[in-house]
Every structure is written in structure tokens, then in C-alpha cells.
Image: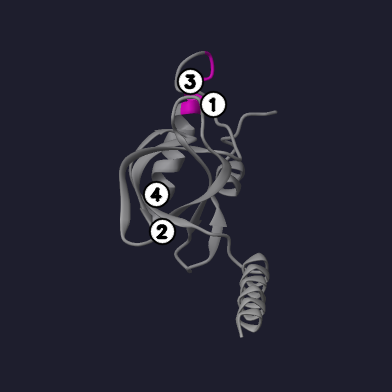
């Protein structure tokens, strides 16, 4: 009986693992963005499972880099910040997908940023910022 139960348990675990790996959408945590620091850093509240909310957290985009707000390219930095404010205001939802390195050297939560457009489609913030010409050239 114990052997059969263990086999059943392992089968269910494997099934759930495979089901998760073929999911259409990545694991996303909803973020209520309260402030945009610059084009790749925001402050907000993140909702986690079990009704846990982390308030006033800083989030840094893991997949793109925009111009800084100071220095020789500050005009591009301000335009990137405005573009992110505009996206925040028109998007239905803003989400962060956790990455392996949870925080950067400044303590900001790293993640891949997503948003839902007015039609409910899930899209990457990186693509939006790239289309607007707000990313730094690598």
C-alpha cells in the first residue's frame, strides 16, 4: 500500500511539473506601480500568493536598460521615464516575472516586466520600450 501511494504521489508530481513547463504564460506577480524612477526602475506593491503583499518595493527590469536621468543622455532618460509612466497609465495590469537572481546590488527586485494592453493581451514591456526607441544600444 505504501509503495503504491508513493508511486502515485511521484506520478502526480511529475505530471504537475510537466504541466507547469508547457504553460502558455509565465509565472507573473501583479504589481501596482506607484512611481516611476526612470525607464527601467519602478516602485510599487507586489502581490504574492496566499494574500501576501510587499509594499513600496523597487523593481528593476532584467531584460533591458534605458538611458540614465543624469549625464550626457539625460534627455533620452527623461523620455524613457515618460514612456513608462504613459504605459503604466494605459495598461490594464502590470506584472513582474521573477528571475533567478532575485535582487541586484542596490536591493532592487529583478524581473521580466509584462503588461496587459487594453485588449487584454499579455505583452513585454521591453518590446514597448524598444518600439519607442528608449533602450540603450548594446
Give the residue displayed 67% in from the left and 78% down from the top.
7
Q: Check if mark 3's residue and mark 1's residue have beta carbons within 8 Å.
A: yes
Q: Earlier in the sequence, mark 4 or mark 3?
A: 3
Mark 3 and mark 2: Cα distance apart in space: 28 Å
Question: Would you say 137 lies left or right of 46 here?
Answer: right
* Residue at disc 4, secondary structure: helix
Magenta region, residue range: 72-77
Q: Earlier in the sequence, mark 2 or mark 4?
A: 4
Question: Would you say 52 lies left or right of 132 here?
Answer: left
Residue 88 shows which numbered tag?
A: 4
Seen in the picture, residue 5 relative to 47 is either above or below; the reply is below
* Residue at disc 3, secondary structure: helix
Q: Check if mark 4's residue and mark 3's residue have beta carbons within 8 Å.
A: no
Does residue 30 show up magenta in the picture? Answer: no
Give the residue displayed 60% in from the left and 37% down from the top.
64
Question: In the rendered image, which quarter is residue 55 located in?
Answer: top left
Q: Earlier in the sequence, mark 3 or mark 2?
A: 3
Q: Earlier in the sequence, mark 4 or mark 1?
A: 1
Q: Which residue is mark 3?
A: 74
Give the residue displayed 54% in from the left and 62% down from the top.
122
Q: Check if mark 4's residue and mark 1's residue have beta carbons within 8 Å.
A: no
Mark 1 and mark 2: Cα distance apart in space: 24 Å
Q: Which residue is mark 1?
A: 67
Amino acid at each position: 500500500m505504501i509503495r503504491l501511494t508513493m508511486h502515485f504521489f511521484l506520478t502526480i508530481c511529475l505530471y504537475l511539473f510537466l504541466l507547469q513547463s508547457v504553460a502558455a504564460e509565465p509565472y507573473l506577480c501583479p504589481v501596482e506601480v506607484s512611481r516611476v524612477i526612470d525607464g527601467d526602475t519602478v516602485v510599487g506593491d507586489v502581490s504574492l500568493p496566499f494574500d501576501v503583499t510587499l509594499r513600496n518595493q523597487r523593481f528593476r527590469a532584467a531584460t533591458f536598460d534605458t538611458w540614465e536621468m543624469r549625464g550626457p543622455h539625460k534627455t533620452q532618460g527623461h523620455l524613457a521615464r515618460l514612456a513608462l509612466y504613459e504605459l503604466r497609465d494605459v495598461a490594464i495590469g502590470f506584472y513582474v516575472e521573477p528571475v533567478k537572481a532575485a535582487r541586484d546590488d542596490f536591493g532592487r527586485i529583478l524581473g521580466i516586466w509584462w503588461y496587459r494592453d487594453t485588449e487584454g493581451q499579455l505583452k513585454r514591456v521591453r518590446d514597448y520600450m524598444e518600439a519607442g526607441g528608449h533602450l540603450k544600444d548594446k
